[in-house]
């Protein structure tokens, strides 16, 4: 194990060894409780006051957030991250996904990049202010279920806590400040027709036939979204609508009585989730009524808004000066909009690269470790001392 940071790597190994998969599939979903408890112990040892707060769970598995606070008073800095990971196919890994493996200048393990690895780096950075009187508080926020429902972040908004002047979410950005990202919606379109013998179409109402018309309308809707909304910050400047999966019927010689289509919409910051969902329903329901089938357009999860940093964000200016890099826009989503909702100046900034996340042999490059610690120390001192 790397000799320069024995405690950091021991903490990372311990955190990686605690499985905390979150998934919409209840059979795969796990509690994040052991990770939260471990982090609480670590931050208490560093002098933080820790609060563990339970949050909603679709699977019934215990879920919790951690708020660890050093110092008192208004203002302050939140360093935030999620404690869950995506599910894995362990047989596709060349190393044990639940242990830290160092080789070839990389730190392998599930969550090393996305994003359990952020917390041990924060612990190392915090040592530089241990025992000092903070002008404004330093707050660590560790959340549940970012990879599935974002219930941890939603719980933070509902409770209105924690609040601070500014917040950094340590998602893997390659240590580049992220000022914007798209939002995400996942919607299920469900059509219920009437089955019957396939020899006579009049004996039923074919849901698959009607879904053909729905898909045609969705492609028109997709083009209209592209023409109406555009943001040059993004590499793909327009919102996207993906036809993800479709299931219908049960046999070739029966009229298809039911058909479901699941879609994904990546919205730009100019768009609103509720308004977009209403536009979608206004496209689908008239088609179902025209062809005599029942229709339901239902969210697969509540959706996550797009993120755009505040105009003239002081935190963005600080990070741009520290890194020498202009703020960028990315395609993946984060908990940023939820922390913004609490009134915090929020930026996404962390070690690792999103290209290594959500795949076998996830890793963080060793050369990210020291620069990230250095940046965090400077940010903490500028914000809290």
Image (cartoon, rainbow, N blue to C red):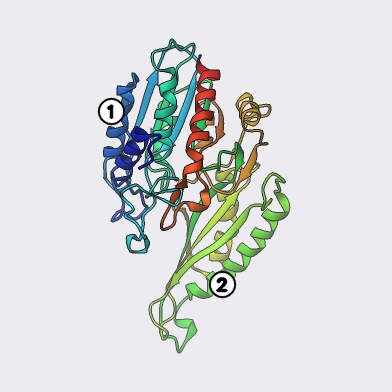
Q: Are marks 1 and 2 in contact (CB under 8 Å)?
A: no
Label drawn at residue 348 = none
The answer to whether residue 341 is visible is no
Secondary structure at badge 1 equals helix
In-image side of 269 versus 29 (left or right): right
**Under tag 2, what secondary structure?**
helix
Q: Check disc 2 and report the residue beneath it.
A: 212
On the image, the x and y values in percent for residue 376 come to 50, 28
Query: What residue is pinned by disc 1?
Result: 41
Residue 194 rendering spot, x and y as whole percentages: 42, 74
Residue at 59% across / 39% down in the picture? 176
Viewer-side residue, 197 vs 363:
363
Q: In which quarter of the view is residue 284 placed?
A: bottom right
Give x and y (percent) for residue 65.
35, 33
Residue 125 lies, with reference to residue 261, above or below; the image says above
Residue at horizontal 44 percent and vertical 45 percent from the top: 114
Q: What residue do we see at 43% from left, 10% from top?
A: 133
User: Which one is in front, 303 or 215?
Assistant: 303
Residue 69 image offset from top left, x and y in percent:
39, 20
Q: Residue at x 41, y 27 (%)?
A: 140
Report the label total. Answer: 2
């Amino acid at each position: 194990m790397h000799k320069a940071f024995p405690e950091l790597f021991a903490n990372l190994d311990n955190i990686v060894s605690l499985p905390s998969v979150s998934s919409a599939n209840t059979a795969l979903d796990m509690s994040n409780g052991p990770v939260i408890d471990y982090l609480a112990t670590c931050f208490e040892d560093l002098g933080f006051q820790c609060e563990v707060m339970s949050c909603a769970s679709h699977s019934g598995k215990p879920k919790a957030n951690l708020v660890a606070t050093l110092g008192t008073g208004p203002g302050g800095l939140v360093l935030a991250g999620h404690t869950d990971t995506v599910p894995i196919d362990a047989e596709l890994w060349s190393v044990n996904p639940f242990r830290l493996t160092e080789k070839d200048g990389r730190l392998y393990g599930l969550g090393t990049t996305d994003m359990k690895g952020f917390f041990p780096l924060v612990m190392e950075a915090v040592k530089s202010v241990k025992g000092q009187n903070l002008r404004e508080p330093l707050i660590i926020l560790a959340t549940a279920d970012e990879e599935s429902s974002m219930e941890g972040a939603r719980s933070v908004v509902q409770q209105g806590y924690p609040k601070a002047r500014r917040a950094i979410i340590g998602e893997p950005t390659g240590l580049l400040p992220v000022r914007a990202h798209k939002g995400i919606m996942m919607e299920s379109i469900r059509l219920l027709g009437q089955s019957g013998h396939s020899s006579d179409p009049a004996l039923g109402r074919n849901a698959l036939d009607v879904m053909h018309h729905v898909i045609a309308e969705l492609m028109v809707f997709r083009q209209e979204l592209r023409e109406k909304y555009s943001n040059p910050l993004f590499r793909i400047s327009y919102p996207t609508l993906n036809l993800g999966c479709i299931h219908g019927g049960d046999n070739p010689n029966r009229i298809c009585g039911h058909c479901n289509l699941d879609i994904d919409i990546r919205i730009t910051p100019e768009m609103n989730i509720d308004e977009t969902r209403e536009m979608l329903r206004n496209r689908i329901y008239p088609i179902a009524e025209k062809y005599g089938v029942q229709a339901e357009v239902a969210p697969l999860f509540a959706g996550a808004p797009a993120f755009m940093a505040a105009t003239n964000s002081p935190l963005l200016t600080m990070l741009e000066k520290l890194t020498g890099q202009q703020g960028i826009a990315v395609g993946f989503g984060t908990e940023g909009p939820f922390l913004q909702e609490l009134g915090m100046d929020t930026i996404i900034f962390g070690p690792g690269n999103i290209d290594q996340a959500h795949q076998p042999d996830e890793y963080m490059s060793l050369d990210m470790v020291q620069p990230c610690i250095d940046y965090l120390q400077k940010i903490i001192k500028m914000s809290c001392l």
